[in-house]
Image (spheres, helix red, strand yellow):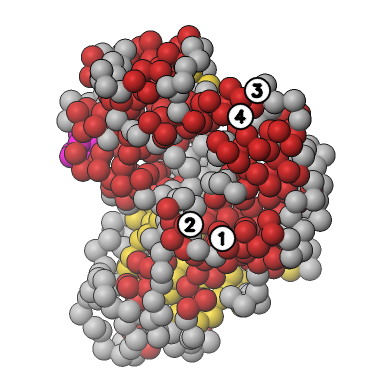
């Protein structure tokens, strides 16, 4: 036995540490991400479902501790990050941002900034009620918190306040009446409409001073037919939440609602509108939906996240819901519109002209983890994200990898990496079908395989883009060592972009190597950032080694 067989910095099994790495949850070794990166991962990906290796409680505690360290290090920066990611719509769910902001209100370094940022993070009544629940886990109802809640009711335009009052009347065990009685907001003497809204919320007092939306709420409760309800909806521009249940099977009511329906509400109700016959091939309703979902500016203003579009597509094309008895015949034009909306919901990506390998981790842990408690697995989400880059590039290949893949029902002792037969010309529902077929061969995680495969098969790659949970453990060599071997042997100073699909604290990217980048999966800015990195607009490589150097 030679000493180099016992210790090497070039060929170290992933079950052993190399400088800079720590033990990950799978028993291998990865690089730790800093607390600010982990904050981003938590805000964008959440931790409600945990991961394959970490329970929801364990993962949430670890993320919460990282948030606390960020607050202690720079409270203002932490609040700014939380508010920016929430307000820009970069996350699929707002719950992590609300929770993190509640934590900020309990720390002296961030308390005032967090309370000032409340309207940016808690934009709806539901958000406010979630915040009220979360904040009680960290602090009491002091004067500053009451003032912030009071300001939430006194600051927005009257029409927006009225919408919150009728659309989000009660959630999380809280109501607007509860909030008003806790915070005691006092409207200005000349703000009679706002005072009328407060009286209506707390006492049910009806008045001519009430905004049109609340007057419409009162009117529709007295409606005696679906046609009368539809007229009131159009005249008052009412949301679905206040329409009496008995009218929600009438096409004319849904037609009236659709005219002013918010984007997210629209895609959530596509199945219902199809089932009752409003959405049909070539109908006016279908054309309206196509128009909305093809307008990038409308989608950005509505904060439509790609996860929402992808889940709506996956559900709608099935023709039946996961729960309940509702069935419908999917309309092709709507499926195509949802497909287009998914791509439009990401920031615009410029082609790099580089040679890319898009490598999808299809190991068992990727099928056991969800993105933002959405039901979408990290593996399926990876394939959809890869399509964003593939759609604008001319020179790329897509591969799937895991260790110990199962062949013909027998576990084979091989390291497997296969081309994936998907194309950006396919609709995303087809892409998800192809990805689902890969799950029968899932195995352990070996994130070194893309680089080893490229080296073995003499693939000329400028940038490897690996979509993974970073819980690598099964390989005979660390991913960073495999990348260095590829660089040394080919003379190509290849880069590595790692797309983290779970909110854990690990990455296969070496933070000290300027040729490696760690980004958060399903961040709407991630594909654009990867493109800039691959094109050489971000990062810097270490000194170039001599081509063909012994590895």
Q: What residue is pinned by disc 3?
A: 221
Q: CA distance from mark 3 to mark 4?
A: 8 Å
Front of the two marks 4 and 1: 4
Can I make out residue 474 in this image?
no
Q: What residue is pinned by disc 1?
A: 293
Is residue 118 or residue 478 the one in the foreground?
118
Q: Which mark is residue 242?
A: 4
Is residue 179 or residue 539 the one in the foreground?
179
Magenta region: 68-75
Q: Which mark is residue 543?
A: none
Q: Secondary structure at mark 4?
A: helix
Dominant SS of magenta comes to helix
Residue in the image at 38% along x and 88% along y: 490
Quarter of the image containing the N terminus? bottom left
The image shows residue 283, relative to residue 57, as above or below, that is below
The image shows residue 505, relative to residue 360, as above or below, that is above
Residue in the image at 47% along x and 78% along y: 392
Q: CA distance from mark 2 to mark 4?
A: 24 Å
Front of the two marks 2 and 4: 4
* Mark closer to the chain start, 4 or 1: 4
């Amino acid at each position: 036995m030679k000493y180099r067989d016992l210790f090497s910095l070039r060929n170290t099994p992933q079950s052993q540490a190399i400088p800079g790495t720590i033990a990950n949850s799978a028993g291998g070794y990865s690089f730790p991400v800093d607390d600010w990166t982990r904050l981003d991962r938590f805000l964008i990906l959440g931790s409600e479902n945990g991961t394959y290796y970490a329970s929801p409680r364990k993962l949430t505690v670890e993320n919460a501790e990282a948030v606390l360290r960020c607050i202690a290090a720079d409270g203002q920066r932490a609040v700014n990050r939380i508010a920016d990611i929430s307000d820009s719509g970069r996350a699929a769910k707002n719950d992590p941002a609300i929770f993190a902001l509640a934590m900020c209100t309990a720390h002296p370094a961030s308390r005032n900034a967090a309370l000032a940022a409340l309207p940016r993070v808690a934009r709806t009544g539901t958000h406010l009620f979630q915040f009220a629940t979360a904040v009680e886990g960290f602090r009491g109802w002091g004067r500053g918190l009451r003032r912030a809640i009071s300001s939430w009711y006194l600051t927005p335009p009257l029409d927006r306040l009225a919408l919150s009052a009728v659309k989000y009347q009660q959630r999380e065990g809280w109501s607007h009446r509860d909030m008003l009685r806790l915070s005691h907001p006092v409207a200005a003497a000349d703000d009679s409409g706002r005072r009328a809204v407060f009286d209506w919320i707390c006492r049910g007092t009806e008045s001519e001073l009430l905004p049109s939306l609340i007057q419409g709420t009162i009117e529709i409760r007295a409606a005696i037919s679906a046609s009368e309800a539809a007229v009131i909806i159009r005249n008052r521009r009412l949301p679905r939440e206040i329409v009496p249940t008995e009218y929600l099977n009438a096409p004319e009511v849904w037609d009236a609602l659709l005219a002013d329906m918010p984007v997210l509400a629209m895609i959530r109700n596509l199945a219902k509108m199809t089932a009752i016959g409003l959405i049909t091939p070539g109908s006016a309703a279908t054309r309206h939906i196509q128009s909305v979902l093809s307008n990038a500016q409308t989608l950005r203003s509505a904060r439509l996240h790609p996860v929402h579009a992808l889940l709506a597509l996956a559900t709608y094309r099935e023709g039946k819901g996961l729960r309940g008895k509702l069935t419908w015949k999917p309309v092709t034009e709507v499926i195509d519109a949802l497909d287009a909306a998914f791509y439009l919901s990401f920031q615009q990506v410029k082609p790099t002209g580089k040679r890319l390998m898009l490598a999808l981790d299809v190991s068992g842990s990727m099928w056991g983890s969800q993105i933002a408690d959405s039901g979408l697995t990290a593996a399926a989400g990876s394939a959809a994200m890869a399509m964003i880059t593939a759609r604008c590039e001319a020179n790329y290949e897509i591969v799937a990898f895991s260790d110990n893949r199962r062949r013909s029902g027998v576990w084979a002792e091989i390291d497997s990496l296969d081309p994936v037969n998907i194309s950006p010309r396919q609709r995303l529902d087809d892409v998800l079908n192809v990805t689902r077929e890969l799950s029968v061969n899932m195995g352990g995680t070996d994130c070194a395989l893309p680089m080893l495969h490229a080296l073995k098969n003499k693939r000329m790659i400028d940038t490897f883009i690996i979509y993974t949970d970073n819980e690598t453990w099964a390989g005979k060599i660390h991913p960073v060592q495999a990348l260095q071997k590829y660089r040394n042997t080919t003379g190509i100073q290849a880069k590595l972009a790692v797309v983290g699909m779970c909110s854990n604290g690990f990455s296969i990217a070496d933070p000290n190597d300027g040729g490696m980048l760690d980004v958060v999966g399903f961040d709407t800015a991630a594909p654009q950032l990867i493109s800039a990195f691959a094109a050489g607009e971000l990062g810097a490589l270490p000194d170039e080694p001599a081509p063909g150097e012994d590895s």
